[in-house]
Image (cartoon, rainbow, N blue to C red):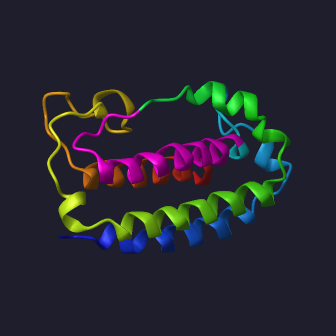
Amino acid sequence: MDSDWLKQLPQTINEASGRLLQISEEASRVPVAEGKWSPKQIVGHLIDSAANNHQRFVRAQFSDDLVFPGYEQEAWVEVQRYNDEPWHDLIQLWRQYNLHLCHVMSSIPDEVRMKSRSRHNLDRIAWQLVDADNPVTLEYFMRDYAGHLQHHLNQIFK
């Protein structure tokens, strides 16, 4: 199994943390484009994503399907008022949570991670959606998480 992506994810997280810390508190509140989230809100969204996917990755180990509740991303960011949080604290929470998720993901046995699941709702909750008729693996969903994380970091760093 090609697990290079999973071995590289902690390095990506640590490098991104360093780059994020170079953004000033003031600049972290400024939307990346008109009508878009600020870096603080994007990192907050990534914290929400980590929280939701943490329980998904754990629950998937005890289930034959990949069917999970979704969440209202915009509403979560709005009600948590991430722009009011200290930038350094958000980065630290995001970093630590994602390093823990790396540990969780790397601890999942190959047979669980690679097991084909015909019942899923990744046609609704994945970043890169999968047709409901196509079987998927937990590996796919975890890679999708990593891709989503990188996508949002790219938004901040562009």
Of the pair 154 and 111, the residue shown nearer to us: 111
Q: Position of residue 65 (x, y in %)?
A: 24, 39
Q: Position of residue 15 (x, y in %)?
A: 58, 71
Residue 63 located left or right of residue 118 = right
Q: Could you say which quadrant of the image residue 42 lies in?
A: top right
Relative vertical location of residue 28 with respect to residue 133 in this rendering, above or below: below
Of the pair 138 and 23, the residue shown nearer to us: 138
Q: Residue at x 58, y 72 (%)?
A: 14
Q: Residue at x 63, y 65 (%)?
A: 96
Residue 49 located left or right of residue 78 = left
Task: Give the magenta range.
Answer: 41-68
Of the pair 129 and 102, the residue shown nearer to us: 102
Relative vertical location of residue 113 with respect to residue 72 in this rendering, above or below: below
Q: Residue at x 59, y 60 (%)?
A: 97
Q: Position of residue 139 (x, y in %)?
A: 27, 55
Return the residue found at the far front.
62
Task: Tell me the quadrant of the picture where the N terminus can be found.
Answer: bottom left
Of the pair 50 and 2, the residue shown nearer to us: 50
Residue 16 belongs to magenta span: no
Specify the principal SS of the magenta part.
helix
Residue 66 belongs to magenta span: yes
Q: Residue at x 41, y 73 (%)?
A: 8
Q: Could you say which quadrant of the image residue 56 lies in?
A: top left
